[in-house]
Image: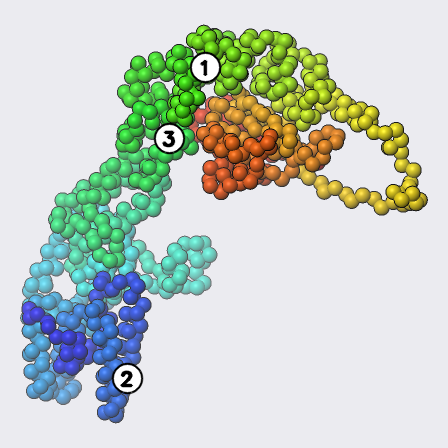
Amino acid sequence: MKKIDLSIEEIVSKYGYASEILECIDLSVVPEDQENFVVSKITEYRNFYNELYVATEYENRIEITRKIIEVLKEIEQYINRRKYMYLSYRNFTTKKELAESGLGPKLTPREAELLTDIIKYIRDADLLSTQDVKFEEGSPKAIIKTSEDFLGQSSRRRNRELVAKRRFEMISEKIDMDELISQLWPSDLIYVCRYQELGSMLADRLMQPIDANNDAIQQGKFTDEELATGKQYIIAELIETTKANIEYMDIDKLLMLIVKRCYDDLRSQALDVDQDALDKFIDILKKLQKFIPEEKRTLNERQTEKINLDEVLDYSVKMSRRFINGSLTFEQDVEEVRRCLLSGEMGFSEISARDYTSTMFFTKAELLEIAAHDVKAIEFFAKEGFLTEEDLDELKSPRRLVELYMDKEKSPENAKEFEIYRKIFKGLVIDGKTDEEKEEVGLLIADQNQELLDENRFRELYNLGLITCDNYVGLVGNEALRDLVEKGEIKPVDVRKMFDRGSISINDFKSILESSGIENEEKLLLIYSTFPTKEDRIVRDELVQFLTDIVEDRERRAKPQGEDEDHGHNNDGNNDVNPEPPPKPRIKEVYDPCAKWAFLAALDPDYSKKYYPRDGHVIMFLPNRGTYIIEKLYDRTQRKGMPRYAYGSATYVMTEEEFEASKSDLIQDGKIDRTVLSQLHRDKAVKKFVHKGWAQSICKYFGLDVPDRYTEEQKREIRKLAEEVENSKIME
């Protein structure tokens, strides 16, 4: 086959014009940013070509010819010059055929010479023109004549087509090719067909106009692409068309493009893919390895992302071991899961398969960090040999716990190590035990170091859930108990236990409510957090009424005598029998605080609280969840009378680590800086919950549906209380 060293201008000047320039454009080499430009030039070429054949004036034909050449020169780099010459060749042969049939003039000697000359450039090229494509009646089967047929080389094409058919039949015996071909799109036939023009024709025949009155449009049964183009295709017809013309296909390209489409489909489904689907894909890839030569296993064309069959297989095999709750995750998702495990956003009980854990190569320190968020992981790590018996003994050691506690102030690293150890120790040694067993553990901890026998340290150990309230009170003495309750230093769950067993009586509560050293809001908080349930209503109402009477009595005694009397005089002393009524306050709806406290107590019975009287905020710490909740509880704009509940303020929830990191900015002069909260929310460091659907959103955040995080009984109770919160709106 002779090398073409002629420019497109020289080819046109010597051999004439090709009737259809689009057939000469190699679409695979046109950059995406040049596609619109090339398409516009194709349109210009067609227009000038049509003008040329109707032009009668010689000058006009010369001008049109110049314009055609200018257009071709602008897109010359994308033109297949050999194909252009073949279409010129077909112009000559068509004219010759018409002459031989007596339907046209004979070729001139110059034309006959050019025809002979052009054959040197197209011999052995296997080229096709759309004018030489016919279809069997009522069938998608194409009958073609290529340059090899016109040049007496048809046997070579026939042998090539026979090999393609036999290969396809052999592959079909091992793999369900109908199912695989169904993954293709009609436009893919342009790429996999050996003749681009034939592929375009097959794709066009498959795409049918969508009936505008088709009910399926309303039912959403068409893709956005189909609706945008106004055309659709039927998968069964795509399969039939591909198989009917399989001899014209590049079998290796066909198989590799199918691999890509299947691979893309798996990745697009991400976590929704099941193990069976992936195993099936892996089985297909292994079989295709036997049918596709190694040098043909890479797909690297502009229209597609570069993929390699062997790499896809290796990647898929690795992915088959990376499942979360039976759903597949890919590389970027694995890294995200790793991050979520280490940060506590995902519990270890939410994933399965040792391969998944070992694939992420956790160090021992990282394994403990994961276990601090989900202590049940310890059992798995020990079973699989990630942790030794010595490791487990150390994690349960009160002595090691106290050593880390005494060193935690020395550096942030020490503080983090203690916090991780504390959570694991608490989960393994304390949680789930009886009150008596917990008290024994507290005594063991206290015995480890005499420096622990300090009220401030004991209070901290108590708030961290390492010693019991009885351990704490045993150090400070029963006479200090009321003072601890007043200051809110006793957890609500422990205050209630003391009330139930008679250590604190209702008269003790009333004595606290009479104290002038405590804000009324904090007194209400004590009542609601200690007696939050429906069963507590009688006691709660008695205490609330007692507090109300105290407040009203103090207000009456604080007013000058006669101030309450209304003599019908306005401020300037004039009589005003019909004074203008004050504006009606806007009615506000807030959740019943009793319902909220009962709900929060169910999420973590060991929660503690701290009230900030200057702005009505309360911060709740849920130690078993490692979480802080910041709630605007009271409206402090009204200083007199019984406290009013805050309205319209969002609730913020953050991890223990994030709270400690931002605490100095967040709490300023005894107030909560909500601008800091808003910024943390914008930075995605905290979660924000508005009042609509508040309880349900909190449930979702705490992972009520996560396996093993709560028992079934706890889940039922929490859901019941969440529903009660949502139905508990009261008017303010």
Q: Amino acid at mark 1?
A: Ile
Which of the two marks, 3 or 2, is nearer to us in this view?
A: 3
Q: Residues within 10 Å of mark 2 (few under 14, many from 20)?
A: some
**Quick one: which residue is furthest to the bottom in this view?**
57
Q: Residues within 10 Å of mark 1 (few under 14, many from 20)?
A: many
Residue lying at 66% horizontally and 22% vertically, measured from the top left:
527
Q: Which residue is mark 1?
A: 430
Q: Secondary structure at mark 1?
A: helix
Q: Amino acid at mark 3?
A: Leu
Mark with earlier residue (1, 2):
2
Q: Secondary structure at mark 2?
A: helix
Q: Are marks 1 and 2 in contact (CB under 8 Å)?
A: no
In front of the other: 258 or 469:
469
Q: CA distance from mark 3 to mark 2?
A: 72 Å
Can residue 170 be seen from the camera position used here? no
**Quick one: which residue is furthest to the right in this view?**
575
Horizontal arrangement in the rendering, residue 559 relative to residue 634 (left or right): right
Measured from the top left, where is residue 140 in percent x and y? 24, 63
**Quick one: which residue is furthest to the front in this view?**
410
Residue 636's disc number: none
Residue 342's disc number: 3
